[in-house]
Image (cartoon, grey):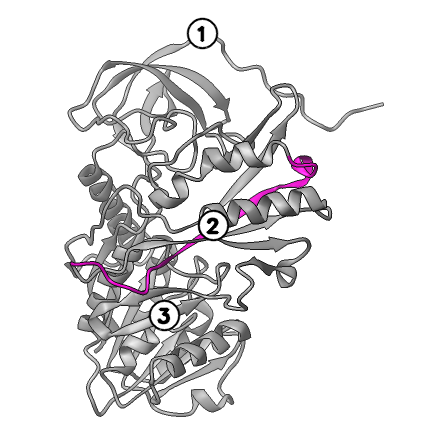
Amino acid sequence: MRHNKRRRQKLPTEPIEIEIQRLSHDGRGVGNIAGKIAFVQGAITGERVVAQYTGQRKQFDELNTIEVLEPSPDRVTPPCVHADICGGCAMQHIAPLVQISLKEKVLHDHLAHIGGLNKFDTIPPMLSQTEGYRRKARLGARYVSKKESLLLGFREKNSSFIAEMGTCAVLNPAVSALIMPLRELLVNFDARMVLPQIEVAVGENAQADANGDHLAEQVALVVRHLEALSEKDSAALLAFAQQHALQMYLQPKAADSIHKVWPADNEERLYYYLHDFKLRMAFHPVDFTQVNGELNRKMIAFALDLLDPQADETVLDLFCGLGNFTLPIATRCKRVVGVEGSEEMVQRGFENAHGNGIENASFYSADLTKEFDEKTWAQPIYDKILLDPPRSGALEIIPRLAAFRAKKIVYISCNPATLARDAGELAKHGYVMTLAGVMDMFPHTGHVESIAEFVLR
């Protein structure tokens, strides 16, 4: 009987010395082994390192640095003690300004090679704090019988296993401080074998501090459990939530089964504040929100400066979510229309508009990958457009977008490849990309957030 499954390839066991020539787009060192490209995790341009094989493919090899023989001046001590094993962020060994330079190069390379765009002004990179910035995360959980231990955190590098971690340098400090107490709590649960993940979200305090800042300290946990919790487990979770002043949610099945168990106040919202626009934004702990609150505020302010909405203008905000851009735009224009695929997010947009006393913002639910010419919201003429699509971009709507003939489009992107592709398409419809730049929404990772301005020729 023939077996079609490949046998696991045996990798070379001997470490190899290699010189690093450049960095790849995801922050790995790139070298050469007997004429074959080698991607080396944990290495930087100009370094000579000793590395161990982690994978081999026809076109390239993959290795992991185990010793740095000649370090680069761009090498820094990672802020996280778990940086060598945790795959949550793989660029902590690279100086932050070098990281952002790499991200700029990634954006420019994609715009040139995919979009055919070279003539535009570069926006200076938008930066924020590089530690403790992450306010939302999904932490994997796994009970290890042999060690009688429960792991909680992100995946290991190049692995599906949960990294053993007690803190996290990029998570909000209030969440990082909960990792070990949560591990110690959950390891004794009757349901410890059926707790696959815990989702965390952090909201801001209603009362501002002396500097006028609303500190991000209101933590909510959503505990996913595959079987019903025993009375003992439920009581322990409630006690933990009370002790640490947390909002506690349970998720026994699909997302629609999520329900709050503490406090018993029927208040299922966290908040963040947009000081420049005097707005308080409400969100459910599992709603999509930007993970980096400081960068989000800077991004909104800069996007509105580019868009420059006027008091007599009508603006369209596509992929609007809960109104993160829509409501700030509403404070400066005659009317703004937000469109989002999720009906729940549309309701959240209305909720936030009402909560902030905004009456010139409308929200509509629509699948933007399908024809929408007959939709009520698609009939008006829009002066300006802002869009913040998912990683897949907005290719399907570019022709209809161009048909509005808005004099300016501001495009927020979380994927430089699809931004470049869409920018090339917009150029075919008469739009010139005048400005583009990166925003470091996820420091220490290869994630590239960017912003671009298009003006109708």
Q: Which residues are magenta?
A: 189-210
Distance from the alpha carbon under mark 1 to that under mark 2: 41 Å
Residue drawn at x 29%, y 74% as measured from the top left: 279
Residue drawn at x 44%, y 24% as measured from the top left: 61
Amino acid type shown at disc 2: Val
Q: Nearer the viewer, residue 408 or 115?
A: 408
Tell me the residue that label 2 is attached to: 200
Amino acid type shown at disc 3: Met
Q: Secondary structure at mark 2?
A: strand
In the rendering, at what x and y percent does residue 160 appear? 56, 33
Residue 369 seen anywhere in this rendered image of the structure:
no
- Report the quarter where the C terminus lies: bottom left
Query: Where 79 sits versus 195, above or below?
Result: above
Q: Tell me whether the residue at label 1 lies in contact with that at label 3, contact meaning CB atoms closer than 8 angstroms.
A: no
Residue 196 is inside the magenta segment? yes
Q: Which of the two marks, 1 or 2, is nearer to us in this view?
A: 2
- Report the quarter where the N terminus lies: top right
Query: Where 145 sits versus 188, above or below?
Result: above
Tell me the residue that label 1 is attached to: 14
Asked where in the image residue 79 lies, by quadrant, the reply is top left
Mark number displayed over residue 161: none
